[in-house]
Structure formats: structure tokens, C-alpha cells
Amino acid sequence: MGATGLVILDNSSLKALLGQQPFVRFWLSRLFGILANQMLMVAVAWHMYEITRSAWSLGLVGLFQFVPALLMTLPAGHWVDRWHKARIFATCMALQAVVALLLIAATWWDFANAPMIYGISMVLGAVRAFQMPAQQALTPQLVPAALLPRAIAMSSSGVQAAVIGGPALGGLLYTHHVITVYAVCTGLLLLAMGLALVVRYHHKPSTGAADLRSVLAGAVFVWQHKPLLGAITLDLVAVLLGGATALLPIFARDLLDTGPQGLGLLRAAPAVGALLMSVLLTRWPLQRRVGHSMLAAVAVFGVANAVFGLSDQLLVSLLALAVTGAADTISVVTRLTLMQLETPEDMRGRVSAVNSIFIGASNQLGEFESGATAALWGPVASVVVGGVATVLVAGAWLRLFPALAQRDHMVSR
């Protein structure tokens, strides 16, 4: 495995991967599922802001996703280690399709309102508690060990393409009608479910007892591995404080004077930066001073968010968000690589579940924090203060987690 887990896919490697039919089916399933989810998030955010015109309401959407995810993720990680992962993923796709169908009905018969959107947000949060550990733990079981780094590279490329294309396509379809977005999402999610159902692999359930000790084993493992703990908590705090995703409808509509198409571009911009950084890391992987590189990237993430908050030009805002995506990729690559290298195979589901809790906290709880502070101070002050706080956190982690800051190589030596 390369230092970052990202490798160049030459023709022979690509041909070998395409010969792994279970992996190809699951790759396509994830691609369609993420594409639909990104479109759905753009439509729901714009729909909510059209209904309420409230930053507080946008923040509550994140909170209502986070709470069920927090309560269910650790048990979900245990179940993922015991149950058929592809079927768990297929069930997650089916439930999201039901949500999209409900939104179609609510819009058509004019009963879409804020409480209903909060309710579906809770469903989406619960679904994500199972989906994320299932998809992270499944890929290593679909390809030979020699092909795993290339499978991760191909999966990463597909995810980034979906995260870029989904918001842009969702914003474009929204200009026709919001029901159009929800209908396309439904079709993509059902297609993703069908592909996941035909994924076959040798399922070997975890032999751990279904008790509290087994459920909490992933959390204990992360706590005992300080570089991994530092990397995960740094990502949590940075996105919690510095993220601006929940406020993008406000910036698009009220501050940058653009429509749902502009919102789609704003949501896609971080993924564009992330994809470009992934390409650079493929060519020039992190090999030395990985701890300091991660901390520096988080500081850049904070500065770029502050620039976005102060910008009143769409192009500058898009560039600033692209920089946040590029900086975040360095943090994500470091965190995921440390997790892959240091986690035993029979604990991947539970450790991935712990990672999912932190990701959910940083994203969904971060959306609530952004909405709450924007309601108090205004959207610009919320984003700028959060960006500055993120820079300060990066400096604090130098002292709080010296094992991470001093980490020189991805692999301990």
C-alpha cells in the first residue's frame, strides 16, 4: 500500500479491477447512491430555506440527522461485523428511496413543511449510521489484498466524481422543479439497491459476543491509539467549527445573488478541490512529516473558510470552497490511512463506526452549530469566526496530541 492509500491506476491494474465483478457492482452501487444523496441534500436544503427563510431551521436539519446517528452508530458497527454488509447497504439505499418518494408526495399534495423535513432528517441520520461502516468495511472483502490499494483509489475517484456531479445536477434539475430532483434521486437509489443486492462475497461473521464490551471495542481501540485519536478528533473539531455547508443556501440566495444552480456549484466546489488534491497526492504522496502536514492543512482549511465568509463574489467563494476541499482531503487521507494500517481486520466495522460518529458529529452537528451561530450573529460572522477558531485548534493540537504532530511516516517505524 502506498503512503496515502492512493495509487495510479495503470491499464493492467484497471483491467484487473474490472475483472472483480463483486467490486465493480458495489462501486457502481456506491456511485449511484452518493450521486442521489448529494442531489437530495441540495434539494432538501433549498426547499427548507424556501419554506422557512431561517438559518436556525437549516441548522436544525443537521442536528436532527446527528442525534439518531450518534445513538445508533456503535451498535451498527457491531452489526456490520456480524451481518451481510452488502445487504445492509442495499437496505440503506431502499430507505433513502422511500424518503425521496415521501418528499415527492409531500410536494405534490402540498404538505411539505419544516417538521416533516426534520422527521426525514432523523431517518437519514439513522440510515447513515449503518451505511458508512458497511461501505467502508465491505471493499476489502471484495478484492484480493494485492488489489486493495487500487480498489481504494478507484473508489475514491468515484466518490469525488459523484460529490462533484450530484450537487451541480441537483441544482440544475431544481430549476425545472423540486419534484424532478426527488424523482431522479428515487430512480438512482433503487438502481443502487439492486446492484448491492447482487454483490456476492464470502461473509465471515465476527465471533465476538453481542455484549456492551464488544460494541464499545472500536471506541476503546481508537482511545488507546493516540495518533489515530488525534487525527479523528482534529477532523471533528475543524469541520464542526469551520464548516459552512448548512449556510450555503443563505449565501447563494441572499449574499451572492444566485439561485439553486449557484447553490449546486457552491456545494460541488469543495469536491472539485478534493479531487484535484487527490490527483496530486497520487503523484506526490505524503511520505514524511505527515503529522505536521495534517495540522497545516487544517489551518489552511480554517483560513479558506474565513475568506469564503467575507467574499461577496461567486468566483472568489467557489475558489475558497475548493481550497477547503483540497485541505480537507489531506486530513481525510491521513486519517483513513492511519485507520486502515492500524486496525485489525475483525474490528474494521466497529472502528469504522467510531469514525462515522466523528464524521457525523463534524458534518451534521457542525451544520447545527453554523445555523445557531448564524441566527445569533449573522451568516458572515458565523463562518469567519469558525474559520479563525479552526486555525487556533490546529495550533492547540500540536501540544494536545504530540504523537500525531510528531508522526513522520504513515507506517510507524
Image (spheres, rainbow, N blue to C red):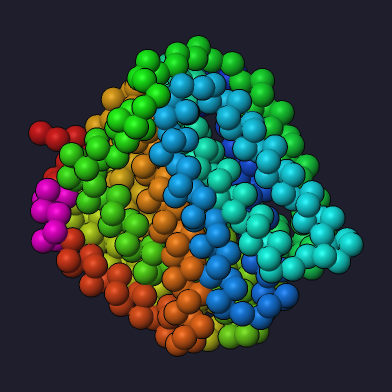
Q: Position of residue 176 (x, y in %)?
A: 84, 65
Residue sticking out furthest to the front: 211
Q: Position of residue 308 (x, y in %)?
A: 45, 77
Above or below: residue 356 compared with residue 108? above
* Magenta segment: 398-406
Q: Is residue 384 left or right of residue 94?
A: left
* Most foreground residue, 207 or 253: 207
Say whether residue 405 is magenta.
yes
Above or below: residue 196 compared with residue 113? above
Q: Quadrant of residue 191?
A: top right
Above or below: residue 258 compared with residue 28? below
Q: Is residue 255 left or right of residue 331?
A: right
Q: Residue at x 14, y 35 (%)?
A: 412
Q: Residue at x 24, y 37 (%)?
A: 220
Is residue 307 visible from the viewing direction of this image?
no
Q: Residue at x 84, y 55 (%)?
A: 105
Please identify the dominant SS of the magenta region. Answer: helix
Q: Quadrant of residue 350?
A: top left
Can you say which quadrant of the picture contains the N terminus? top left
